[in-house]
Amino acid sequence: MGPGELAIIPKPLSAERIKKGAVEKYASWVTPGSGFKSLGDFKRRVASIPAKGGEWKSAYVNPGAKAPAWVPSGIEFWKRDSLQVLRDIVGDVRLVQHMKWAPERHRNSKGERIYSELWTGNWWWETQV
């Protein structure tokens, strides 16, 4: 990133900021036993989180010459492949009990139709016919 550019997501945190924010002996606000024991402990735990939704990639938006003077010359942002994110969500066996693949009609005790979620509405029924 050069001068006049803006980052939507900040650069990775420095070791000092991580220590002050998450490592117990440097962060007085962290309840003993709930923080990280060291910077190495933090990095090991973060590295152990399974990657989901593909990798993050940086991209830029350049507003162009007609943009007002106050607009940065370039804006960096981070993105992932939305189809890969969706594949990971649908493929996660821990979420199976929360997914709906067919419409449902719900009724209250008086027999009146209840509309509460997308799969309980008429649109889903009409779309799947």
Image (cartoon, rainbow, N blue to C red):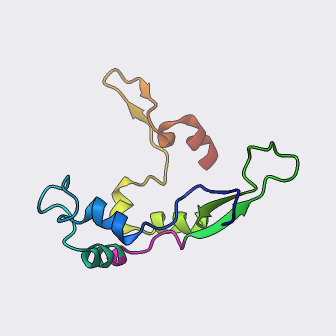
Foreground pick, 57 / 89: 57
Residue 34 colored magenta?
no
Q: Tell me where the magenta segment starts and ends, as one range.
A: 47-55
Kindly give the residue lying farthest to the top in the view shown. 110
Q: Position of residue 74 (x, y in %)?
A: 73, 58
Between 34 and 92, the one lying in front of the other is 34
Q: Name the foreground residue: 104 vs 43.
A: 43
The quarter of the picture where residue 22 lies is: bottom left
- For image coordinates 44% across by 33% down, the residue present is 116
Q: Residue furthest front?
A: 3
Residue located 59% across and 55% down the image: 8
Q: Residue furthest right?
A: 66
Residue 129 shows in the view: no
Question: Horizontal placement of 75 versus 78: left or right?
Answer: right
Q: Position of residue 31 (x, y in %)?
A: 14, 55
Q: Kindly tell me whether residue 124 is visible in this rendering.
A: yes
Who's the residue at 37% across and 60% down the image?
95
Point out residue 17 in the picture as x, y percentages from the top left corner. Answer: 36, 63
Question: Between residues 94 and 100, which one lies in front from this camera angle?
Answer: 94
Q: Is residue 52 magenta?
A: yes
Up-down: is 73 above or below 94?
A: above
The quadrant of the rendering that contains the N terminus is bottom right
x, y percent for residue 39: 28, 74
Q: Quick check: 129 left or right of 63?
A: left
Q: Main secondary structure of the magenta part?
A: loop
